[in-house]
């Protein structure tokens, strides 16, 4: 048996150093991906908080309530306000959908969010009519995913939810 030469020792040490370097790079990439996912989640939460904060303005809340209680008497300005409301929420959903396609969020995350949020977004005749008119303008893969979820929401979902809440609280 021959003794390893100095060159063989240097080669072995270099190979080990390269392997350790590759492992460290892989670890750092994973950390960066985890941080990116965390940042995307935080951005989505912040956007939702801002959208909810808009309802602190009674005028915004009144337009939203009118959209499911009396959509037939909405003014054009109120219709446009609700158009923005729905478009903003769908844009947030679209961002998650794109991130899912890129592998940045878990598979099925977009559908899960749609199933949770759409009863509040599309639970009225107004929102259903809006989707019928403007839904086709979104990317087809998004529409294929969102369409069945929108259709599964009842037209009077919001009226029923908030009506029950009023009854529970005995509000006129």
Image (tube, rainbow, N blue to C red):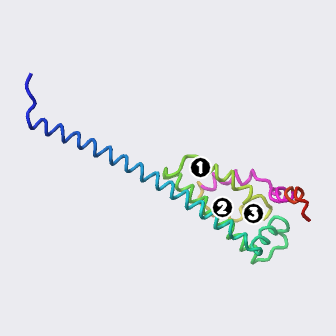
Where is residue 29? Give x, y as percent: 38, 50
Judged from the image, the secondary structure of the residue bearing numbered disc 3 is helix
The quadrant of the picture occupied by the N terminus is top left
Tell whether 35 sits left or right of 94: left
Q: Cβ–Cβ below 8 Å for labels 2 and 1? A: no
C-beta proximity under 8 Å, tags 2 and 3: no
Residue placed at 69% from the left, 70% from the top?
Answer: 54
Q: Nearer the viewer, residue 84 or 56?
A: 56
Q: Quadrant of residue 78?
A: bottom right
Mark 2 and mark 1 lie on one chain; the one further toward the N terminus is 1
The single residue placed furthest to the top in the displayed view is 1
Task: Return the x and y of residue 37 as percentages of the image width and height.
Answer: 50, 54
Q: CA distance from mark 2 to mark 1?
A: 22 Å
* Magenta region, residue range: 142-163
Which residue lies at the image location 57% right of the left edge and 55% below the top edge? 97
The mark nearer the N terminus, 3 or 1, is: 1
Q: Which of the labelled discs sits on residue 136, or is there none?
A: 2
- Of all residues, the one furthest to the front in this rendering is 169
Q: Nearer the viewer, residue 140 or 12?
A: 12
Residue hosting label 3: 127
Expressed as whole percent of the image width and height from the top left, the position of residue 69 reads: 85, 65
Residue 25 in the image: state x and y as whole percent: 33, 48
Q: Earlier in the sequence, mark 2 or mark 3?
A: 3
Q: Which residue is mark 1?
A: 109
Helix, strand or loop at label 1? It is helix
Rounded to the nearest whole Å, what is the CA distance between mark 3 and mark 1?
A: 23 Å
**Direction from residue 40 to residue 124 in the image, left or right:** right
Q: Main secondary structure of the magenta part?
A: helix
Q: Nearer the viewer, mark 3 or mark 1?
A: 1
């Amino acid at each position: 048996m021959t003794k390893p030469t100095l060159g063989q020792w240097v080669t072995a040490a270099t190979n080990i150093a390269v392997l350790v370097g590759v492992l460290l790079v892989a670890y750092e990439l994973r950390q960066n991906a985890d941080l990116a996912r965390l940042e995307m989640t935080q951005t989505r939460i912040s956007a939702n908080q801002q959208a909810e904060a808009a309802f602190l303005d009674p005028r915004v809340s009144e337009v939203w309530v009118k959209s499911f209680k009396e959509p037939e008497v909405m003014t054009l300005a109120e219709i446009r306000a609700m158009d923005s409301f729905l478009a903003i929420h769908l844009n947030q959903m679209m961002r998650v959908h794109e991130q899912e396609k890129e592998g940045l969020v878990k598979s099925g995350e977009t559908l899960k969010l749609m199933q949770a949020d759409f009863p509040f977004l599309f639970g009225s005749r107004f929102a259903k009519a809006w989707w019928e008119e403007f839904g086709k303008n979104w990317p087809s893969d998004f529409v294929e995913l969102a369409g069945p979820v929108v259709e599964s929401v009842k037209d009077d979902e919001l009226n029923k939810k908030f009506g029950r809440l009023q009854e529970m609280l005995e509000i006129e």
